[in-house]
Image (spheres, rainbow, N blue to C red):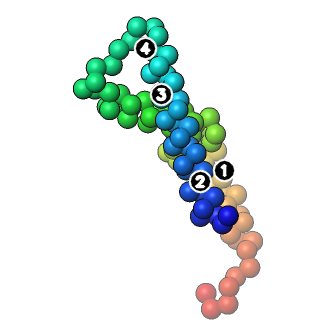
Amino acid sequence: MNEKEDSFHSSMERIELVQKIVREYLRYASTLGSFVPHLYEKIVVEELSIRVQEMITKRVYGYVNLNDYRASFSENQKREAERRYLELVALAPKKVGN
């Protein structure tokens, strides 16, 4: 299996996992007496799916998206990272013709 196929299967597995979690959650909610009218079922399933995907992403990566990751650093940490990067750039050998 190549990388593209592996990524596709991984995505399919994740979709199946999300669908399973949503189904089980709705089944459990119904045992507690919760009821979703048929008219709103699709909207509720879509919203739950989005929330479950976010939870999985946060659990796996620690952050929901790149903005959350970036926001987790203080301004001092960002300045320090930039300073270290500039030091590394200064140490890098110069390319011929530049």
Seen as rendered, the residue at the extreme left is 39
Q: Amino acid at mark 1?
A: Glu
Seen as rendered, the residue at the extreme bottom is 97
Find numbered disc 1 in the image and state the secondary structure of the residue it sits on: helix
Image quarter of the C terminus: bottom right
Whole-number angstrom distance, CA of label 3 to CA of label 2: 21 Å
Q: Amino acid at mark 2?
A: His
Which residue occupies 54% across, 49% down?
12
Label 4 close to label 1 by CB (< 8 Å): no
Whole-number angstrom distance, CA of label 4 to CA of label 1: 52 Å
The residue that label 1 is drawn on is 80
Point out the tag, 2 or 1, that comes first from the N-terminus: 2
Find numbered disc 3 in the image and state the secondary structure of the residue it sits on: helix
The residue that label 2 is drawn on is 9
Vertical comparison of 82 with 33: above or below: below
Whole-number angstrom distance, CA of label 3 to CA of label 1: 46 Å
Pointer 4: residues within 10 angstroms few (<14), some, or many (20+)? few
Q: Position of residue 30 (x, y in %)?
A: 43, 14
Q: Position of residue 72 (x, y in %)?
A: 58, 38
Point out the tag, 2 or 4, that comes first from the N-terminus: 2
Q: Amino acid at mark 4?
A: Ser
Whole-number angstrom distance, CA of label 2 to CA of label 4: 31 Å
- Judge by depth and name the residue closer to the eye, 50 or 26: 26
Label total for image: 4
Point out the tag, 4 or 1, that comes first from the N-terminus: 4
Vertical comparison of 33 with 36: above or below: above
Which mark, residue 23?
Answer: 3
Foreground disc of the pair 3, 1: 3
Label 3 close to label 2 by CB (< 8 Å): no
Find numbered disc 4 in the image and state the secondary structure of the residue it sits on: helix
Which mark, residue 55?
Answer: none
